[in-house]
Image (tube, rainbow, N blue to C red):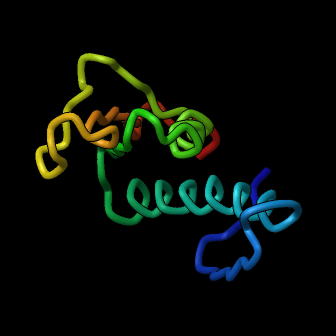
Amino acid sequence: MDLHLTGKRALVTGSTAGIGFAIARALATEGARAVLRFAFDELGRDEIVAYTTTTNLRSRRVMEKLEMTYDPEDDFDHPRIAPGHPLRPHVVYRIRSTNRQGR
């Protein structure tokens, strides 16, 4: 689904359940797609790197939908989060401009 969000804004309320949640999920992916297009096409970046906590499965799913790649060798403990805290472990996803589908 491509909602053609480049240059658009959206406000979604009630995004914790039901239709609002479904819209928010779609907008997260499509909004991230618009950011990638801008970074590659307008800013000329060669690679985009994103990271999140290991437990943030929704963000990880968005990165996977964007066809970003995950390499466990890049995992790290966030230096600004206390040792032992469940949000300290992070994963890294990457996408190179040459690996993009559906430009």
Residue 98 x/y as whole percent: 41, 33
Residue found at the far right of this picture: 19
Please give the name of the residue rendered at 24% of the width and 17% of the height, measured from the top-left corner.
73
Please identify the quarter of the rendering in which residue 39 is found.
bottom left
Please give the name of the residue rendered at 73% of the width and 68% of the height, measured from the top-left corner.
15
Q: In this view, does 30 lie to the left or right of 54?
A: right
* Closer to the camera in the image, 40 or 89: 89
* Closer to the camera in the image, 83 or 23: 83
Residue 36 x/y as whole percent: 47, 54
Residue 81 x/y as whole percent: 19, 48
Q: In this view, does 20 lie above or below 94?
A: below
Residue found at the far left of this picture: 79
Residue 99 x/y as whole percent: 46, 31
Q: Is residue 80 above or below residue 51?
A: below
Please identify the quarter of the rendering in which residue 4 is found.
bottom right
Residue found at the far front of this picture: 84
Q: Is residue 66 left or right of residue 17?
A: left
* Closer to the camera in the image, 93 or 103: 93
